[in-house]
Image: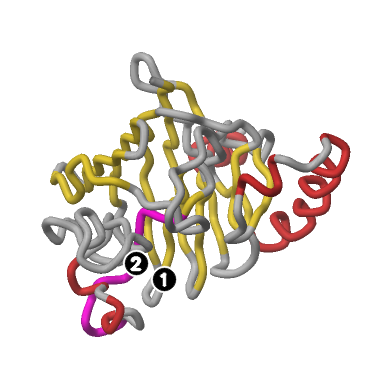
Amino acid sequence: MKSIFLSALLIAPLAAAPEGFTNLFNGKDFKGWWGAATENPVKYLALPPTQLEQKKKQSLHDIYKHWSVKNGIIHNDGHGLFLTTEKNYADFELQLEYKLDPKADSGIYLRGVPQVQIWDTTEETSVSLKHGAAKGSGGLWNNPKGTAGREPLVHADQPIGEWNKMMVKLVGENVTIILNGKTVVDHAKLFNYFDKKGSLPKEGPIQLQTHGAPMQWRNLFIKEL
């Protein structure tokens, strides 16, 4: 009886989705997810259904090598393909929490397009200071230099090892991002990384990108607009 009680304590309960939102993650496994890299979603979504299904199936070998679920939390070891939603989204509001290890470098792809930047921003441990990490996470890092949204308006990151809460709202091509209660991107255009002169795809998956060091995710909620 005692061991059962202790096991129950170790399993973090799946948080209830806010009103109007649904859970992207079931707290147990990666049902509803597959693995993709930095690749144009327009191209793989145009594959014949059987080829796309095979691509998704093959990707799961890599996903289960580098991603895991422990106590209701998603863990990545800093390597491998990016966790990618089976479902494609157009306009949405996304809420999630994440926690970084030192030297981590990560991001969130919107409609399969990079990216909302997340990284270690501390001078002592970051390996990305020369790329702008000191200014904080949450910027649209793959936007052209000098454009609105590429750099966050304020540094809003929690210290490494603590949970961060992020809200991302995408409507059309415009993105608003709130990190730990502070607006870091205010209605800025997300440029299409794969087609510099083209518009964003009308819809596509959400991807959780990680590399460089381990990272954790929890409480992923989405509301389609």
Q: Quadrant of residue 175?
A: top left
Q: Reply yes or no: does residue 119 show up in magenta.
A: yes
For the point 20% across and 66% down, which residue is it? 146
Q: Residues within 10 Å of mark 1 (few under 14, many from 20)?
A: many
Residue 90 is a magenta residue = no
Q: What is the tally of numbered marks visible in this picture?
A: 2
Label 1 sits on residue: 104
Q: Quick one: SS at disc 2?
A: strand
Residue at 51% x, 69% y is 211
- With respect to residue 204, does 150 lie above or below? below
* Classed neighbour count for the residue bearing mark 2: other residues with Cα under 10 Å, few (<14), some (14–19), many (≥20): many
Q: Quadrant of the C terminus?
A: top left
Whether residue 164 can be seen here: yes
- Whether the residues at callouts 1 and 2 have beta carbons within 8 Å, the answer is yes
Residue 115's spot in the image, x, y percent? 41, 55
Residue at image mark 2:
119
Q: Nearer the viewer, residue 220 or 109?
A: 109
| Of the pair 185 and 22, the residue shown nearer to us | 185
Residue type beneath disc 1: Ala
Quadrant in which residue 127 is drawn? bottom left
Identify the residue at horizontal 37%, vertical 75% (top origin): 102
Name the quadrant of the N terminus: top right
The residue lying at 17 percent from left, 43 percent from top is 186
Q: Which residues are magenta?
A: 114-125
Tell me: 170 left or right of 155. right
